[in-house]
């Protein structure tokens, strides 16, 4: 039986971040992961600048620059009709900080390893090939593993991802409101720029297709969408992916390119709900806490952030005199840190209709401000709550409508 103050289940970004910040605050922590490492994770590998604050605190920015597959400086969205909106990466992390104009696409096998190594370096004990199979919370928390080594602790962080074998024991409807994504690697892709490319399509609803460059003519190519929407379409994800690759906008982008191996799919846990964050002395982080952003499928930065929040709350509760009631701060803190998830979920519902989505993106081509706003929806650079400023939306559409009319007049005149 291994004893520690805290145990973390899962060595992905959420688990490594939790273990790192716990160890840094002097908490004795054991982290267990079922896989043999370095392990891969089915993912697009796109990092937004939202990841930077936590990575900076972990002292990983320099290493990230070295290990990243690709540095990108902009985004492009193609609507189904071929409308193209472009925007540079432009973010500030914190008031008064310098503007950041790039971010990275990473290989999860490499990225997750540097995170886990950092947690180990900070003092966390890491046990790989150790799978949690049961959790007993009746007194001290006991985590039973398949390998028959048991772990005892005062507080448990469950960061087992969207596969969620342990989360499932605590939460009902684990996949309610979730999405699914499929990815593949293509080689010999021509015309790749320093941009993440997104493709909208009625068949993926408020999801998208993507082409993310990963260097040397290679690209991570995939699609992601709401599971309920996929069911409505009566299709499976592989079938839909194959169809998307034949679409008039995507097909020419992959002309002459070759798919490496088979596409791989995995669920993403959405449906933000603070009641999924904690059960007594068990805290959930990352995908286990449904922290995938509903407007773009981004989960890495939120996994990192929730690991940090969980660690700070646990360290506070374990301070003498130990008071587990202080763990209730986890929901309160998370409500602040992830405050835009609620608005984003509302927006996802609103934009769930392909007709509304098409209207927004097609009009966005005619107005820069609206374009930036529509882009902000996908890359999460702007405050989503501002999207509900009705006056500016109406203004944006009015300007876009006028420009569209003018353009049509000019086009007719040219004919
Ligand atoms: C196809 C696809 C593309 C995506 N693209 C992006 C993207 O471009 N950008 C982005 O930000 N997000 C993306 N995501 C989402 C992102 O991958 C997740 O949100 C992120 O990995 C969540 O991190 P995590 O630490 O919570 O879980 P994970 O990274 O899934 O880590 C969970 C860990 O728990 C371990 N584990 C599970 N069960 C047990 C157990 N019983 N015992 C011990 N260990 C266990 C696993 O081995 C794993 O290492 C994508 C997801 C998919 C499916």
Image (cartoon, rainbow, N blue to C red):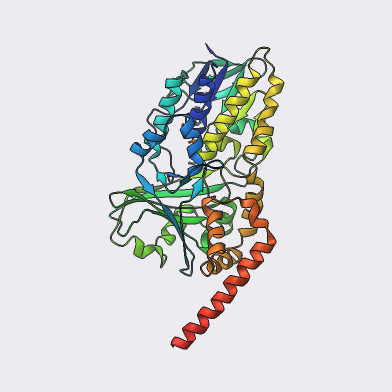
Position in image of residue 187 (x %, y %):
29, 52
User: Which residue reaches farthest right?
Assistant: 325
Q: Nearer the viewer, residue 387 or 196?
A: 387
Position in image of residue 317 (x %, y %):
65, 20
262 vs 281: above or below: below
Position in image of residue 369 (x %, y %):
56, 62
Position in image of residue 116 (x %, y %):
43, 27
Q: Is residue 108 visible?
A: yes
User: Which residue reaches farthest front?
Assistant: 96
At a point 61% along the width and 69% down the height, the residue shown is 397
Instruction: Give the quarter of the image for residue 328.
Output: top right
Q: Is residue 255 left or right of residue 343?
A: left
**The C terminus - image quarter:** bottom left
At a point 35% along the width and 65% down the height, the residue shown is 252
102 vs 87: above or below: above
Q: Nearer the viewer, residue 394 or 173?
A: 394
* Count of marks placed on residues: 0
């Amino acid at each position: 039986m291994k004893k520690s103050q805290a145990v973390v289940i899962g060595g992905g970004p959420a688990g490594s971040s939790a273990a790192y910040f716990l160890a840094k605050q002097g908490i004795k922590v054991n982290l267990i992961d079922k896989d043999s490492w370095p392990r891969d994770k089915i993912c697009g590998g796109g990092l937004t600048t939202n990841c930077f604050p936590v990575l900076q605190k972990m002292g990983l920015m320099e290493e990230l620059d070295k290990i990243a597959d690709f540095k990108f400086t902009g985004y492009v969205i193609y609507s189904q009709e071929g409308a193209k909106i472009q925007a540079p990466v432009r973010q500030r992390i914190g008031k008064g900080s310098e503007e950041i104009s790039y971010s990275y696409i990473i290989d999860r096998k490499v990225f997750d390893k540097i995170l886990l190594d950092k947690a180990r370096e900070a003092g966390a004990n890491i046990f790989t090939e150790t799978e949690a199979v049961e959790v007993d919370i009746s007194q001290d928390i006991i985590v039973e593993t398949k390998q028959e080594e048991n772990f005892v602790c005062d507080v448990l962080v469950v960061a087992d991802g969207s596969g969620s074998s342990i989360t499932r024991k605590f939460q009902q409807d684990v996949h309610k409101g979730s999405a699914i994504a499929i990815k593949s690697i293509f080689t010999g892709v021509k015309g790749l720029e320093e941009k993440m490319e997104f493709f909208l399509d009625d068949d993926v609803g408020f999801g998208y297709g993507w082409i993310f460059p990963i260097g040397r003519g290679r690209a991570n190519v995939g699609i992601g969408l709401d599971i309920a929407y996929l069911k409505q379409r009566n299709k499976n994800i592989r079938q839909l992916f194959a169809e998307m690759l034949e679409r008039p906008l995507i097909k020419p982008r992959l002309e002459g390119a070759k798919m490496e191996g088979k596409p791989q799919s995995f669920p993403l846990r959405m449906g933000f709900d603070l009641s999924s964050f904690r059960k007594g002395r068990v805290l959930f982080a990352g995908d286990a806490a449904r922290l995938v952003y509903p407007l773009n499928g981004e989960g890495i930065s939120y996994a990192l952030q929730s690991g940090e929040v969980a660690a700070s709350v646990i360290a506070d509760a374990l301070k003498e005199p130990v008071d587990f009631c202080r763990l209730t701060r986890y929901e309160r803190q998370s409500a602040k840190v992830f405050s835009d998830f609620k608005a984003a979920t509302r927006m996802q519902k609103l934009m769930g209709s392909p007709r509304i989505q098409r209207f927004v993106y097609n009009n966005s081509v005619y107005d820069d401000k609206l374009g930036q706003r529509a882009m902000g929806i996908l890359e999460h650079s702007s405050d989503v709550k501002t999207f509900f400023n009705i006056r500016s939306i109406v203004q944006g559409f009015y300007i876009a409508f006028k420009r569209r009319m003018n353009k049509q007049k000019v086009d007719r005149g040219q004919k």
